[in-house]
Image (cartoon, rainbow, N blue to C red):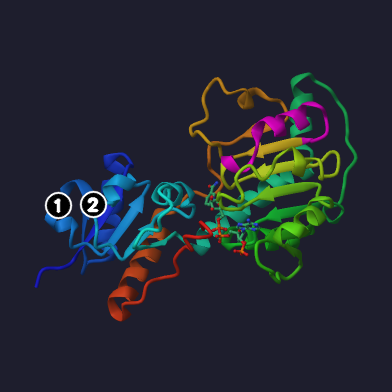
Amino acid sequence: MTKPIIAFVSQLAEHEQVTWLQLLSAKLPNESIKLDKDLSQAQKLHCEIAIVANPNPEKLSQYSQLKWVQSLWAGVDALVAELTSNKQTPSFALARLVDPLLAKTMSEAVLTWVLYLHRDMPKYLQQQKVARWQQHRYFLPQERTVGILGLGELGKLSAIRLSDNGFNVLGWSQSEKKVKGVQCYSGNNELITMIRQCNIIVCLLPLTATTNQLINCDLIQQLPKGASVINFARGGIIAHDDLVKYLDDGYLEHAVLDVFEQEPLDKNNPLWSHEKITVLPHISAPTHFESAGDIVASKIKKYRINGQLPVCIDWRKGY
Ligand code: NAP
């Protein structure tokens, strides 16, 4: 009997696609995984699983019998937006990468950059440039309130890690949550209540119709003066013009931005040279090949045994 084919659909460079293909094939010796470009039209019609990384949605639409699409990335906002742009829900289920190692990596990034702001590193970097010897007041971690927007796979562990390091941590999500050591808020009504207390906010929300441009002047105004913003989620969640305005007029202290609407960020973009902005090239939590491969392989093995789909995104919510 011929093995059913799993399609690998991606716009990554071909050598990257081949690396993934080799890794996944080694972890799934009983499966036949093939690149989209190597499949005939007839073969595509028999695929019920596709593994994707930045796929071209038109290519994906050629697979009319798909039951399940597994992304290798944790964020699937661009794919969801493209697949639902005609206001229709695709007939297949979409699972994103949920990897405890990724959450650990993100929590490390959150702790790193919160400490960077907490210990006034941006100020000392500027001072060194002009040989200025000036000491700023030291605050204890418990004197800093950090608000995490999004208490999902990445936000929850990040909140716990900050709390374990002595910070006063608040968190916000759509539905009510209980997280040890974290004061939790939920829903639109409680956002402002939380924001008003935060010296630092860390964005770990998915980009959806509801979170698009959520961090705008209305929200920024609710932060205490001197607060800082970290965005590790998606560029579209921040209205960058508003952010820059509030940094320029001295209301906000600093912003650490790892994600942008256009990536790579254009060389001429003024965000690069803004002295109150730290620009990072989308590095806070990269997908770990081996770990992601193990997780995807294990989901596929389970599906082959019991026919059950893994946890998938809710098309209506967009995450
Ligand atoms: P997740 O598990 O889906 O968690 C999302 C969280 O956001 C949940 O707590 C959810 O609330 C909350 N949320 C969503 N919409 C909301 C709204 N309108 N109001 C209030 N809360 C809302 O996602 P994740 O795995 O933690 O990942 C978060 C994002 O991180 C991804 O979407 C991706 O864009 C980004 N990311 C970035 C990098 C990087 O390297 N920079 C790497 C990986 C991921 P509920 O819990 O109530 O549903």
Q: Is residue 252 magenta?
A: yes
- Residue 228 appears at what percent x and percent y? 76, 41
Cβ atoms under marks 1 and 2 closer than 8 Å? yes
Q: Main secondary structure of the magenta part?
A: helix
For disc 1, the neighbor class at 10 Å (few under 14, some 14 to 19, many from 20) is few
Asked whether the viewer can see residue 130, the reply is yes
User: In front: 291, or 262?
Assistant: 262
Q: What residue does disc 1 label? A: 41
Q: Which residue is mark 2?
A: 62
Q: Which residues are magenta?
A: 235-253
Q: Nearer the viewer, residue 268 or 221?
A: 221
28 relative to 43 in the view: left or right: right
Which image quadrant is residue 15 in?
top left
Q: Position of residue 118 (x, y in %)?
A: 78, 45
Ligand 1, seen in the image, is in the quarter at bottom right
Is 108 in the magenta?
Answer: no
Q: Residue at x 82, y 45 (%)?
A: 222
Location of the N terminus by quadrant is: bottom left
* Amino acid, disc 2: Gln
Q: Position of residue 30 (x, y in %)?
A: 21, 69
Q: Residue at x 34, y 75 (%)?
A: 302
Label 1, label 2: how far apart the Cα atoms are: 8 Å
Q: Element type at marker 2?
A: loop
Secondary structure, mark 1, is: helix
Q: Compared with residue 197, is residue 227 higher up or lower down, i.e. above or below?
A: above
